[in-house]
Image: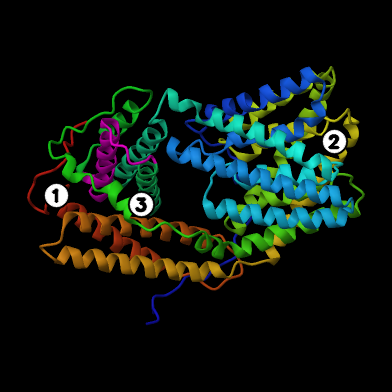
């Protein structure tokens, strides 16, 4: 039946300039990808310097840069993810090298690069591989398209990338020896901090949907992290599960918990010390249903993830192609820079894409100035060139979590220095080409995003509303059944929580999209409120909260 709930007209939003440039807090683990990429890049490049073959460093860097991925995943899941990243990197590099060996026609090569960029963008988004996403893959494959190549050289160059990729896998997995539960501890700590933040805001009176949505997303991510960590039971694992349950209790009854206690548990999860144990005697094995319920949810098929990304993939292909051709028309010798610039812009909606456009332009323009200042030092010799690249590799990962433009300030000189591995290039020419390609890629890329609209965004919101409605009905039926098994009720609770998280993410993405039908914003709010009331009822039914009016709590409210 068609809803009669009024809808809010989807107005065109203003495009801010200052807001996208604001700096945020650095990531809790900013140093991990920064150190990992240095450890993965340095040995192959220094070996090539010793052998006098720094011209091959582009191929080893393709494999080494895989060490940037999957730092937020438990090690069992990280091992698999890094294998797929290395294979994906090799596949894109292989296509690019074969194309470069078959033709030098820039028009054809730009077309190949655009199709590759769209495929890499769609696959990275569908698999949710996480940062740095598709940008690194596109940078490598696009640059390889314009490197002189013969078919006979392709296997050797791919072998270099594969060996470096294996080394990157080892670097990415090395921390398991020191903190085997590190990623799960961080995810649990984030869930506790987010729940504490929501408890503080909700206690003031009015409900705060944003803080609540962030907290539920963090709890969902914590359960997924614990689920992905494997099936091996341990005392640390059980302790983390209990803490995530405490975070869920805080979301269901924010007025009945002490935020200071949640934050204290989060602090205690730092390092390698013992996992804190909640002092509630009922925090026993009978509560630990969350991971089992998470595993009971059928994984999404790759096709179901790719379908909604079709408009984004089309934007990427069109924007990259037009940017590359515009660069060629202006006589720039490296059109892949414009292609990569366009590819890096595309986010979940137009509003976010505009923000990334501002960040990319500012970061690149500042970056070329830094390159011009550093170039004389890098030109002192191959070793100086490699050391400068390592410094910028570290800086890019150290700063990018604060804001994308700040990371781009280091990425830009790094990309310019990489072009000098085969031999010295005139600094003035590199700077001029990079500035032109940045502006061309940003302007043409954003224009393509405006032309290719995502009219499926509204339909996805309707689908998410339907999913939440069904999940809530299922949970309500179990609540009405006095004989319902706790495991079934908890599975229904987890399913409803996941559906609510997806609804909020879908509504946020759609609200930043232009040229579409009005979104049912009021209906989204009403469905979310009803869903969270049902979640609170399921938590109470499972014995983690008191019945209304009993005056008893499952959590000591004192800090």
- Image quadrant where one finds the C terminus: top left
Q: Residue at x 69, y 57 (%)?
A: 316
Question: Element at badge 1?
Answer: loop
Marks 2 and 1, how far apart in space?
65 Å
The answer to whether 7 is drawn above or below residue 190 in the figure is below
Q: Is residue 394 left or right of residue 265?
A: right
Query: In 3D space, how far apart are the residues under numbered discs 2 and 3 (Cα atoms)?
Result: 47 Å
Count residues near mark 1 (Cα–Cα under 10 Å), then give few for <14, some for 14-19, many for 20+: some
Please provide percent x and percent y for residue 251: 28, 48
Which residue does the image show at 90% across and 55% down from the upper left? 329
Decide: marks 1, 3 in contact (CB < 8 A)?
Answer: no
Q: Which residues are magenta?
A: 229-255
Residue at image mark 2? 431
Report if residue 367 is visible in the image: no
Vertical comparison of 261 with 18: above or below? above
Going from N to C along the chain, the mark reached first, 2 or 1, is: 2
Q: How is the image coloured?
A: rainbow
Q: Provide the residue designation for mark 1.
A: 543
- Residue, x 39% and y 42% (percent of image)? 225
Q: Of helix, strand and loop, which one carries label 2?
A: helix
Task: Report whether 233 appears left or right of 92.
Answer: left
Task: Give the left or right position of residue 390, taking residue 127 as reference.
Answer: right
Up the image or down, 265 lies above or below 522; here it is above
Dominant secondary structure of the residues highlighted in magenta in the image: helix
Q: Is residue 128 visible?
A: yes
């Amino acid at each position: 039946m068609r809803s009669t709930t009024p809808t809010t007209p989807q107005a065109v939003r203003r495009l801010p300039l200052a807001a996208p440039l604001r700096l945020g807090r650095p990531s809790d683990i900013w140093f991990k990808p920064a150190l990992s990429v240095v450890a993965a890049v340095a040995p192959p490049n220094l070996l090539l310097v010793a052998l006098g073959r720094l011209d091959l460093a582009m191929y080893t860097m393709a494999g080494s840069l895989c060490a940037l991925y999957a730092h937020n995943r438990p090690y069992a899941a990280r091992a698999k993810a890094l294998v797929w990243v290395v294979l994906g990197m090799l596949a894109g590099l292989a296509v690019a090298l074969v194309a470069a060996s078959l033709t030098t026609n820039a028009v054809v090569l730009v077309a190949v690069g655009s199709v590759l960029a769209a495929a890499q963008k769609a696959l990275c988004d569908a698999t949710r591989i996480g940062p740095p996403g598709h940008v690194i893959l596109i940078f490598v494959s696009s640059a390889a398209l314009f490197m002189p190549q013969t078919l006979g050289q392709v296997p050797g160059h791919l072998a270099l990338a594969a060996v470096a990729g294996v080394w990157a896998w080892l670097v990415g997995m090395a921390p398991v020896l020191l903190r085997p539960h590190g990623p799960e501890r961080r995810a649990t700590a984030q869930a506790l901090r987010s729940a504490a933040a929501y408890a503080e805001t909700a206690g003031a009176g009015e409900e705060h949907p944003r803080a609540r949505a962030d907290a539920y997303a963090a709890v969902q991510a914590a359960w997924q992290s614990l689920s992905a960590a494997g099936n091996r039971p341990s005392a640390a694992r059980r302790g983390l599960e209990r803490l995530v349950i405490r975070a869920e209790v805080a979301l269901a009854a924010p007025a009945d918990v002490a935020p200071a206690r949640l934050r204290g548990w989060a602090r205690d999860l730092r390092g390698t010390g013992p996992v804190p144990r909640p002092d509630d005697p009922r925090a026993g094995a009978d509560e630990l249903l969350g991971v089992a319920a998470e595993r009971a949810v059928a994984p999404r098929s790759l096709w179901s993830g790719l379908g909604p990304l079709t408009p984004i993939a089309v934007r990427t292909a069109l924007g990259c192609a037009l940017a590359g051709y515009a660069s060629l028309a202006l006589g720039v010798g490296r059109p892949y820079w414009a292609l990569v610039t366009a590819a890096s812009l595309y986010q979940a909606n137009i509003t976010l894409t505009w923000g990334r456009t501002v960040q990319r332009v500012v970061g690149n323009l500042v970056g070329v100035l830094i390159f011009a200042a550093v170039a004389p030092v890098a030109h002192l010799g191959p070793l100086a060139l490699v050391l400068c690249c390592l410094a910028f590799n570290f800086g890019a990962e150290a700063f990018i979590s604060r804001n994308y433009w700040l990371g781009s300030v280091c990425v830009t000189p790094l990309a310019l220095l990489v072009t000098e591995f085969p031999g010295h290039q005139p600094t003035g020419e590199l700077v001029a080409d990079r500035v032109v390609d940045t502006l061309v890629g940003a302007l043409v890329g954003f224009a393509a995003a405006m032309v290719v609209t995502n009219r499926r965004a509204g339909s996805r919101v309707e689908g998410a509303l339907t999913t939440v409605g069904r999940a809530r009905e299922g949970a309500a039926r179990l609540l009405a059944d006095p004989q319902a098994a706790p495991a079934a009720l908890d599975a229904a609770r987890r399913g409803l929580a996941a559906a609510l998280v997806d609804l909020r993410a879908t509504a946020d993405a759609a609200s930043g999209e232009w040229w579409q039908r009005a979104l049912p914003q009021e209906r989204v709010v009403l469905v979310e409120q009803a869903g969270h009331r049902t979640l609170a009822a399921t938590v109470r039914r499972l014995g983690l909260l008191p019945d209304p009016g009993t005056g008893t709590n499952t959590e000591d409210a004192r800090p």
